[in-house]
Amino acid sequence: MPELVKKCPECGGINLSWNKERGEIICKDCGLVIEEKMVDFTQEWREFDSEDGDRRRAGAPMTYTQYDHGLGTEVGQKADLFKLGGRDRNKFFRLRKWQYRISTAIERNLKLALAELKRVSSYLKLPKSVEEESARIYTLAVQKGLVRGRSMESVVAGALYAACRRHDVPRTLDELSEASGIEKKEIGRTYRFVTRELGITILPSNPADYIARFASSLKLSAETQSNSIEILEQAQKAELTSGRGPTGIAAAALYVSALLHGEKRTQREVADVAGVTEVTIRNRYKELLDELKLEKEIKKKKKSRKKR
């Protein structure tokens, strides 16, 4: 009870009752309503979902993965509408139809695009942070009119690739092409256009980011994996990584490391995992051997294994 009211001004009694629901303070002795329409400043607890009986202070947080950021309302759920009588049911179905019709073109585009974005993100097993960032990038692209004249799927794929690069989540254009059904060149072209128009700065991807995934797919040991990262560091110091694809140089470093540790993998196996050609693996492999003087070390390892 508020500390300001301590006794009844009418009878002087101190037997007061505070009704929180009505916002009133009443004297139990004489029945006088001392205060009314009082504002309740305590925490508010509500049920946001009729199916869920839990009482919470707030709803779900804002998210770009929903076209209305998760703040919109919808006229009835379909499951709830079927509980109504015939006339009421038709009325609410008509309201739902008009609610969809009066939505803007951007909202309708976002509904379809974000559903596609979630599908591709789930296929690639991307974390929630990447999905949220890609949805934000796509929303900005729609608001600036960058989607006009381009397919929705290609812009979605470009936004996902940009988000992966920003969060250092290694995914190749080939993987995005396979997941989205859009050509690799089209995704790259859209990605460059969107990042340029939105002013998104993305640093070149580090080849070391791909090592863990490639090593896991090739079932290589942890020792081989750590050694390949050391080879990449030497290659970066020798400026062998500049101007070359990160996936190709990472795959070649793994191939060299596997040879050093006696874990034989063919160039075709490594190329398939990395999404590059055998020619690329062969060229990067030769560059690493020539510049880092690793050929002698590989021969020594082979001789020592033969002696055993």
Image: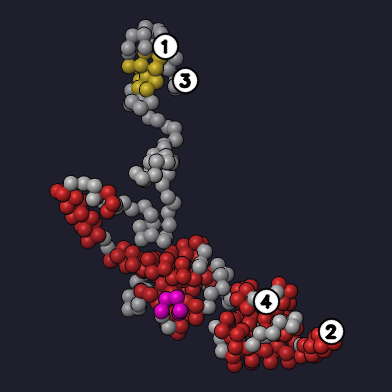
The residue beneath circle 2 is 308
User: Mark 1 to mark 4: distance in Å?
Assistant: 79 Å
User: Mark 4 to mark 2: distance in Å?
Assistant: 22 Å
Mark 3 near mark 2, Cβ–Cβ under 8 Å? no
Toward which corner of the image does residue 39 lie, by quadrant? Answer: top left
The residue beneath circle 1 is 15
The residue beneath circle 4 is 220
Toward which corner of the image does residue 151 lie, by quadrant? Answer: bottom left
Marks 1 and 4, the one that precedes in the sequence = 1
Q: Which mark is residue 292?
A: none
The residue beneath circle 3 is 3
Whether residue 295 sits left or right of residue 152 in the image: it is right
Mark 1 near mark 2, Cβ–Cβ under 8 Å? no
Q: Residue furthest right?
A: 307
Marks 3 and 1, the one that precedes in the sequence = 3
Magenta range is: 177-181
Q: Amino acid at mark 2?
A: Arg
Of tags 1 and 4, which is closer to the observer? 4
**Rendering coords of residue 23 (x, y %):** 35, 25
Of tags 3 and 1, which is closer to the observer? 1
What element does badge 3 sit on?
Answer: loop
User: Mark 3 to mark 1: distance in Å?
Assistant: 14 Å
The mark total stands at: 4
Whether residue 172 sits left or right of residue 290 in the image: it is left
